[in-house]
Amino acid sequence: MAPSEPSNLTARTVVVLGLARSGTSVVTGMLKILGVDMGPSVEDNANPRGSHEDLDFAKLHKELFDMAGDGKDYWNPPSRQTILELAPRMDVRIRALLAKKRDGKSVWGWKHPRTLLTYELFLPYLTHPHFVLVFRNPLATALSAVEHTRKLRRPLNVAQALSLGRFYDGEMLRFLENHPDIPSQLVAYEDVVLDPLKEAAKMAGFLGRDLTDETTRALSALVIPRERLALEKRKRRSFLRGKLPQLIRKWSQERR
Protein backbone atom coordinates (compact mmCIF):
# COMPACT_ATOMS: atom_id res chain seq x y z
CA MET A 1 0.00 0.00 0.00
CA ALA A 2 1.35 3.43 -0.95
CA PRO A 3 1.95 5.93 1.87
CA SER A 4 -0.95 8.30 2.37
CA GLU A 5 -0.41 11.92 1.46
CA PRO A 6 -0.40 14.37 4.38
CA SER A 7 -3.16 16.93 4.58
CA ASN A 8 -2.40 20.17 2.75
CA LEU A 9 -3.52 21.94 5.93
CA THR A 10 -0.53 20.56 7.85
CA ALA A 11 2.04 19.97 5.10
CA ARG A 12 5.14 22.14 4.97
CA THR A 13 8.17 22.30 2.69
CA VAL A 14 11.13 23.93 4.42
CA VAL A 15 13.84 25.42 2.20
CA VAL A 16 17.05 26.77 3.73
CA LEU A 17 18.69 29.59 1.77
CA GLY A 18 22.11 30.95 2.63
CA LEU A 19 25.66 31.35 1.41
CA ALA A 20 28.13 28.52 1.79
CA ARG A 21 30.16 29.00 5.00
CA SER A 22 27.43 31.18 6.53
CA GLY A 23 26.01 28.80 9.15
CA THR A 24 23.36 27.00 7.11
CA SER A 25 24.68 23.62 8.30
CA VAL A 26 24.02 24.30 11.97
CA VAL A 27 20.60 25.81 11.20
CA THR A 28 19.68 22.74 9.15
CA GLY A 29 20.89 20.52 11.98
CA MET A 30 18.55 22.40 14.29
CA LEU A 31 15.66 21.86 11.88
CA LYS A 32 16.37 18.13 11.87
CA ILE A 33 16.25 18.06 15.68
CA LEU A 34 12.92 19.89 15.48
CA GLY A 35 11.56 17.01 13.41
CA VAL A 36 11.91 18.32 9.87
CA ASP A 37 13.02 15.59 7.45
CA MET A 38 15.94 17.27 5.63
CA GLY A 39 16.98 14.21 3.63
CA PRO A 40 20.20 12.16 3.46
CA SER A 41 23.36 14.23 3.87
CA VAL A 42 26.41 14.57 1.68
CA GLU A 43 29.52 13.28 3.46
CA ASP A 44 31.62 16.25 4.57
CA ASN A 45 34.93 15.70 6.35
CA ALA A 46 35.39 19.47 6.73
CA ASN A 47 32.41 19.79 9.06
CA PRO A 48 32.57 17.66 12.24
CA ARG A 49 28.82 18.05 12.83
CA GLY A 50 27.90 17.37 9.19
CA SER A 51 27.03 19.68 6.32
CA HIS A 52 23.39 18.50 6.24
CA GLU A 53 23.40 19.16 2.48
CA ASP A 54 20.80 16.94 0.86
CA LEU A 55 22.49 14.28 -1.27
CA ASP A 56 19.70 14.12 -3.86
CA PHE A 57 19.61 17.89 -4.35
CA ALA A 58 23.41 17.93 -4.54
CA LYS A 59 23.27 15.51 -7.48
CA LEU A 60 20.51 17.47 -9.20
CA HIS A 61 22.35 20.77 -8.75
CA LYS A 62 25.57 19.34 -10.15
CA GLU A 63 23.66 18.22 -13.22
CA LEU A 64 22.04 21.65 -13.54
CA PHE A 65 25.31 23.57 -13.20
CA ASP A 66 27.12 21.22 -15.61
CA MET A 67 24.41 21.95 -18.16
CA ALA A 68 24.81 25.69 -17.49
CA GLY A 69 28.47 25.70 -18.52
CA ASP A 70 31.79 23.91 -18.26
CA GLY A 71 33.41 24.33 -14.86
CA LYS A 72 30.40 26.03 -13.31
CA ASP A 73 29.83 25.40 -9.62
CA TYR A 74 28.94 27.34 -6.48
CA TRP A 75 32.32 29.13 -6.44
CA ASN A 76 32.15 29.94 -10.16
CA PRO A 77 28.40 30.30 -10.69
CA PRO A 78 26.42 30.67 -13.90
CA SER A 79 23.99 33.53 -14.18
CA ARG A 80 20.57 33.17 -12.66
CA GLN A 81 19.04 33.62 -16.11
CA THR A 82 21.09 30.73 -17.51
CA ILE A 83 19.73 28.48 -14.76
CA LEU A 84 16.13 29.55 -15.37
CA GLU A 85 16.45 28.81 -19.09
CA LEU A 86 17.11 25.17 -18.20
CA ALA A 87 13.63 24.82 -16.65
CA PRO A 88 11.98 23.04 -19.64
CA ARG A 89 14.79 20.48 -19.84
CA MET A 90 14.76 19.77 -16.09
CA ASP A 91 11.02 19.95 -15.39
CA VAL A 92 10.40 16.18 -15.33
CA ARG A 93 13.47 15.51 -13.17
CA ILE A 94 12.52 18.23 -10.69
CA ARG A 95 8.92 17.07 -10.33
CA ALA A 96 10.03 13.46 -9.86
CA LEU A 97 12.52 14.41 -7.16
CA LEU A 98 10.02 16.54 -5.25
CA ALA A 99 7.37 13.81 -5.43
CA LYS A 100 9.87 11.31 -4.03
CA LYS A 101 10.95 13.65 -1.24
CA ARG A 102 7.50 14.61 0.02
CA ASP A 103 5.94 11.14 -0.26
CA GLY A 104 4.01 10.52 2.94
CA LYS A 105 5.71 13.35 4.87
CA SER A 106 3.97 16.24 6.56
CA VAL A 107 7.11 18.34 7.01
CA TRP A 108 10.23 17.96 4.93
CA GLY A 109 12.82 20.17 3.30
CA TRP A 110 16.33 20.58 2.05
CA LYS A 111 19.44 22.67 2.26
CA HIS A 112 21.95 23.12 -0.54
CA PRO A 113 23.84 26.36 -1.27
CA ARG A 114 23.15 26.30 -5.02
CA THR A 115 19.43 26.61 -4.26
CA LEU A 116 20.10 30.36 -4.15
CA LEU A 117 20.11 30.25 -7.95
CA THR A 118 17.54 27.49 -8.50
CA TYR A 119 14.64 28.02 -6.10
CA GLU A 120 12.42 29.46 -8.85
CA LEU A 121 12.58 26.08 -10.61
CA PHE A 122 11.12 24.35 -7.55
CA LEU A 123 8.60 26.90 -6.30
CA PRO A 124 5.69 25.95 -8.63
CA TYR A 125 5.66 22.41 -7.19
CA LEU A 126 6.17 23.01 -3.46
CA THR A 127 3.38 22.49 -0.91
CA HIS A 128 3.13 25.38 1.57
CA PRO A 129 6.79 26.44 1.23
CA HIS A 130 8.45 27.99 4.27
CA PHE A 131 11.88 29.55 3.69
CA VAL A 132 14.58 29.93 6.32
CA LEU A 133 17.16 32.53 5.25
CA VAL A 134 20.50 32.41 7.06
CA PHE A 135 22.79 35.45 7.28
CA ARG A 136 26.29 35.86 8.66
CA ASN A 137 28.84 38.66 8.93
CA PRO A 138 30.06 39.06 5.30
CA LEU A 139 33.74 39.20 6.20
CA ALA A 140 33.51 36.08 8.37
CA THR A 141 31.76 34.25 5.52
CA ALA A 142 34.39 35.42 3.03
CA LEU A 143 37.33 34.39 5.23
CA SER A 144 35.76 30.97 5.75
CA ALA A 145 35.28 30.66 1.97
CA VAL A 146 38.95 31.51 1.38
CA GLU A 147 40.01 28.80 3.83
CA HIS A 148 37.55 26.29 2.36
CA THR A 149 38.68 26.82 -1.26
CA ARG A 150 42.43 27.04 -0.73
CA LYS A 151 42.99 23.48 -2.03
CA LEU A 152 40.63 23.81 -4.99
CA ARG A 153 41.81 24.33 -8.55
CA ARG A 154 40.67 27.98 -8.39
CA PRO A 155 41.01 29.14 -4.77
CA LEU A 156 39.42 32.44 -3.80
CA ASN A 157 41.18 35.42 -2.33
CA VAL A 158 39.41 37.71 0.14
CA ALA A 159 38.31 40.22 -2.51
CA GLN A 160 36.86 37.45 -4.71
CA ALA A 161 35.10 35.85 -1.75
CA LEU A 162 33.56 39.17 -0.73
CA SER A 163 32.42 39.81 -4.29
CA LEU A 164 30.87 36.34 -4.52
CA GLY A 165 29.16 36.92 -1.19
CA ARG A 166 27.69 40.17 -2.48
CA PHE A 167 26.38 38.34 -5.55
CA TYR A 168 24.63 35.69 -3.46
CA ASP A 169 23.35 38.23 -0.93
CA GLY A 170 21.70 39.89 -3.92
CA GLU A 171 19.93 36.61 -4.68
CA MET A 172 18.69 36.46 -1.08
CA LEU A 173 17.36 40.00 -1.39
CA ARG A 174 15.76 39.13 -4.72
CA PHE A 175 13.84 36.31 -3.06
CA LEU A 176 12.54 38.57 -0.29
CA GLU A 177 11.51 41.28 -2.75
CA ASN A 178 9.86 38.95 -5.27
CA HIS A 179 8.08 36.61 -2.83
CA PRO A 180 6.74 38.60 0.12
CA ASP A 181 3.79 36.21 0.25
CA ILE A 182 5.94 33.17 1.11
CA PRO A 183 6.43 32.66 4.86
CA SER A 184 10.07 33.42 5.64
CA GLN A 185 12.20 33.30 8.77
CA LEU A 186 15.43 35.33 8.86
CA VAL A 187 18.20 33.88 11.03
CA ALA A 188 21.53 35.43 11.98
CA TYR A 189 24.29 32.87 12.51
CA GLU A 190 25.80 35.01 15.27
CA ASP A 191 22.50 34.88 17.17
CA VAL A 192 22.40 31.10 16.85
CA VAL A 193 25.87 30.79 18.40
CA LEU A 194 25.00 33.30 21.14
CA ASP A 195 21.66 31.76 22.16
CA PRO A 196 20.79 28.59 20.18
CA LEU A 197 17.72 27.72 22.24
CA LYS A 198 16.18 31.15 21.72
CA GLU A 199 16.69 30.90 17.94
CA ALA A 200 15.43 27.32 17.90
CA ALA A 201 12.26 28.44 19.69
CA LYS A 202 11.70 31.04 16.97
CA MET A 203 12.09 28.41 14.23
CA ALA A 204 9.84 26.00 16.11
CA GLY A 205 7.11 28.64 16.32
CA PHE A 206 7.58 29.52 12.66
CA LEU A 207 7.06 25.89 11.61
CA GLY A 208 4.50 24.87 14.22
CA ARG A 209 6.88 22.43 15.93
CA ASP A 210 7.22 21.70 19.65
CA LEU A 211 10.30 22.10 21.82
CA THR A 212 10.60 19.17 24.23
CA ASP A 213 13.19 18.42 26.91
CA GLU A 214 14.78 15.91 24.53
CA THR A 215 15.02 18.35 21.62
CA THR A 216 16.32 21.07 23.94
CA ARG A 217 19.17 18.82 25.09
CA ALA A 218 19.98 17.85 21.50
CA LEU A 219 19.97 21.49 20.39
CA SER A 220 22.29 22.48 23.22
CA ALA A 221 24.74 19.75 22.18
CA LEU A 222 24.61 20.72 18.49
CA VAL A 223 25.80 24.31 18.70
CA ILE A 224 29.35 24.39 20.06
CA PRO A 225 31.87 27.23 20.53
CA ARG A 226 34.07 28.09 17.55
CA GLU A 227 37.25 27.09 19.40
CA ARG A 228 35.92 23.60 20.10
CA LEU A 229 34.64 23.31 16.54
CA ALA A 230 38.13 24.10 15.23
CA LEU A 231 39.58 21.41 17.49
CA GLU A 232 37.12 18.82 16.19
CA LYS A 233 38.02 19.76 12.62
CA ARG A 234 41.72 19.22 13.34
CA LYS A 235 40.96 15.82 14.83
CA ARG A 236 39.00 14.78 11.76
CA ARG A 237 41.90 15.82 9.53
CA SER A 238 44.43 13.90 11.59
CA PHE A 239 45.77 10.61 10.27
CA LEU A 240 44.06 8.33 12.77
CA ARG A 241 40.68 10.06 12.68
CA GLY A 242 40.58 11.40 9.13
CA LYS A 243 43.06 10.16 6.55
CA LEU A 244 43.36 6.57 7.74
CA PRO A 245 39.61 5.77 7.46
CA GLN A 246 39.64 7.36 3.99
CA LEU A 247 42.55 5.13 2.93
CA ILE A 248 40.76 2.07 4.30
CA ARG A 249 37.59 2.95 2.37
CA LYS A 250 39.61 3.51 -0.82
CA TRP A 251 41.43 0.17 -0.38
CA SER A 252 38.13 -1.61 0.25
CA GLN A 253 36.53 -0.10 -2.85
CA GLU A 254 39.52 -1.08 -5.03
CA ARG A 255 39.25 -4.71 -3.91
CA ARG A 256 35.57 -5.00 -4.86
Image: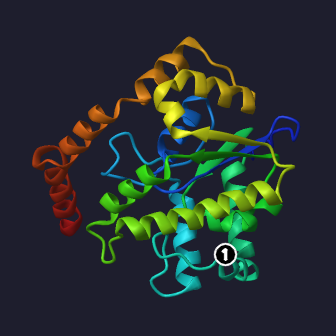
Q: Quadrant of residue 227?
A: top left
Residue 125 visible from this viewpoint: no
Measured from the top left, where is residue 168 in percent x and y? 58, 63
Residue with the most extreme top position: 213
The residue that disc 1 covers is: 80
Q: Quadrant of residue 7?
A: top right
Q: Is residue 201 above or below residue 41?
A: above
Left-right relation of 133 to 54: right
Q: Residue at x 20, y 63 (%)?
A: 250
Q: Quadrant of residue 79?
A: bottom right
* Quadrant location of the N terminus in the rendered image: top right
Task: Give neighbour class at mark 1: few <14, some 14-19, many 20+ (Cα, 10 Å).
Answer: some
Left-right relation of 128 to 148: right
Q: Is residue 84 above or below residue 192?
A: below
Q: How many marks?
A: 1
Q: Is residue 69 above or below residue 34?
A: below
